Image: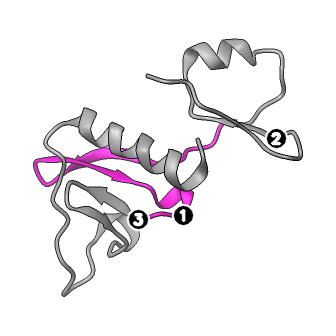
Amino acid sequence: MDDDILIGEDGHISYVYSDRLDAIFADVPRETVRASHVEPYCGGWAADMRPSGGGVLGSNGESTAFGEFGHRYVGVEPLVPFQTRQAALDAERAWLRKELGL
């Protein structure tokens, strides 16, 4: 897994958590926030990017057609789950890189 670090113009540092990076920044005050949730979904896996302002990722793309607690809105194309958790994690990382620069 790559360690991507984003340093803003104001000096704010953001990165996708890894134990290795956490150790590097051990003496720096920091706040850990959840960027997403990778969870079981309909016999497979989905990456919920809503904590970062996105939708829910499945193997057929991104859907914003989810309400509270993962309930789908009626009349919306169903999300096709990823077959493996790793595929959902890879999609999560790709989304974070594309949308947030991480």
Of 3 and 55, which appears nearest the observer?
A: 3
Query: Relative to residue 29, is residue 96 drawn left or right?
Result: left
Q: Of callouts 2 and 3, which one flags the residue occurring earlier in the amino acid sequence?
A: 2
Residue contact between numbered discs 1 and 3, judged by CB atoms under 8 Å:
no
Residue at 18% over, 37% down: 84
Specify start and end residues of the magenta stretch as a single range. 32-55
Which amino acid type is marked by label 3?
Gly
The image quadrant that residue 60 belongs to is bottom left
The correct choice, above or below, for 83 with respect to 99 in the image is above
Q: Which mark is residue 12?
A: 2
Which residue lies most toward the left here? 43
Which amino acid type is marked by label 1?
Gly
Residue on which disc 1 sits: 53
Cα separation, mark 1 vs mark 3, equals 7 Å
The image quadrant that residue 71 belongs to is bottom left
Q: Which mark is residue 55?
A: 3
Query: Relative to residue 83, is residue 34 drawn left or right?
Result: right
